[in-house]
Amino acid sequence: MINLELGYFIAKFYLAGYFVCFLFSYKNKHINQSNLIIATIALVNCIFNQYLKEALDFYTFYLGAAFQVLILLLISLIIHRYFRIRHEKTTLLIYVLYILIAISFMVIHRVRVVIFDSDENIMWLINAHSVFTLTLYFLSICVLTYGGLIKWKLPFGRLSL
């Protein structure tokens, strides 16, 4: 398992990553509003996630995390539909990544609570799940960064001799 100091560092790393994605999308807001919406919601979700982890117990921890990811997707879809903003390909890819994260949380909840009554028998599964979700969160940050930078028109791109 991950010790407390490393977990705190990873949480701060992801928070900084989502903040950078938010800044890139904000600077590019006229071209790519879709990524701005999902980056803002993901940043708020990352901040709220720390409070959620402290409040939930053994039986509801993974189910609450899955619910939180699904609420993130639902809020993003509602905002996109309300403002009639077309989804970008990068936003759809982030939706797929978050759906995979939510499904993995629901599967680990089912295995952890219903099949086993303690973590001792399935520590390998919990550790593999942690690596899987951390990788998917990192990929979502990479996709958000790519989506925020893709349509920038840099002034030094048209140099001629």
Image: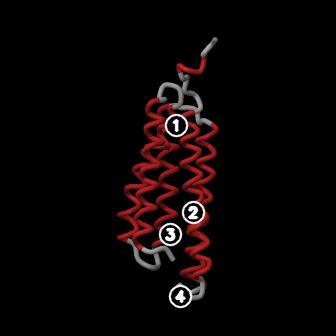
Task: Specify few, some or many for label 1: CA neighbours under 10 Å numbering under 14, 14-19, or 20 or more.
Answer: few
First-in-chain label (3 vs 2): 3
Q: Residue at x 54, y 23 (%)?
A: 154
In this view, 117 is above or below 50 = below
Which of the labelled discs sits on residue 105, or is there none?
Answer: none
First-in-chain label (4 vs 2): 4
The three-letter amino acid code for the residue at tag 2 is Thr
State the image coordinates of residue 6 (x, y, percent, origin top left).
Answer: 44, 68
Disc 4 and disc 1 in contact, CB within 8 angstroms: no
State the image coordinates of residue 133 (x, y, percent, origin top left).
Answer: 57, 63
Task: Specify few, some or many for label 4: CA neighbours under 10 Å numbering under 14, 14-19, or 20 or more.
Answer: few
Which color mode does the image show?
secondary structure
Q: Nearer the viewer, mark 2 or mark 1?
A: 2
The three-letter amino acid code for the residue at tag 4 is Asp
Disc 3 and disc 4 in contact, CB within 8 angstroms: no
Task: Specify few, some or many for label 3: CA neighbours under 10 Å numbering under 14, 14-19, or 20 or more.
Answer: many
Gap in angstroms between the C-alphas marked 3 and 4: 15 Å
Gap in angstroms between the C-alphas marked 4 and 1: 42 Å
Disc 2 and disc 1 in contact, CB within 8 angstroms: no
Secondary structure beneath label 2 = helix
First-in-chain label (3 vs 4): 3
Secondary structure beneath label 1 = helix
Q: Nearer the viewer, mark 4 or mark 2?
A: 2
According to the image, label 1 marks what residue?
81
State the image coordinates of residue 138 (x, y, percent, origin top left).
Answer: 56, 54
According to the image, label 3 marks what residue?
63
The three-letter amino acid code for the residue at tag 3 is Leu
According to the image, label 2 marks what residue?
133
The three-letter amino acid code for the residue at tag 1 is Arg
According to the image, label 4 marks what residue?
117
State the image coordinates of residue 137 (x, y, percent, origin top left).
Answer: 55, 56
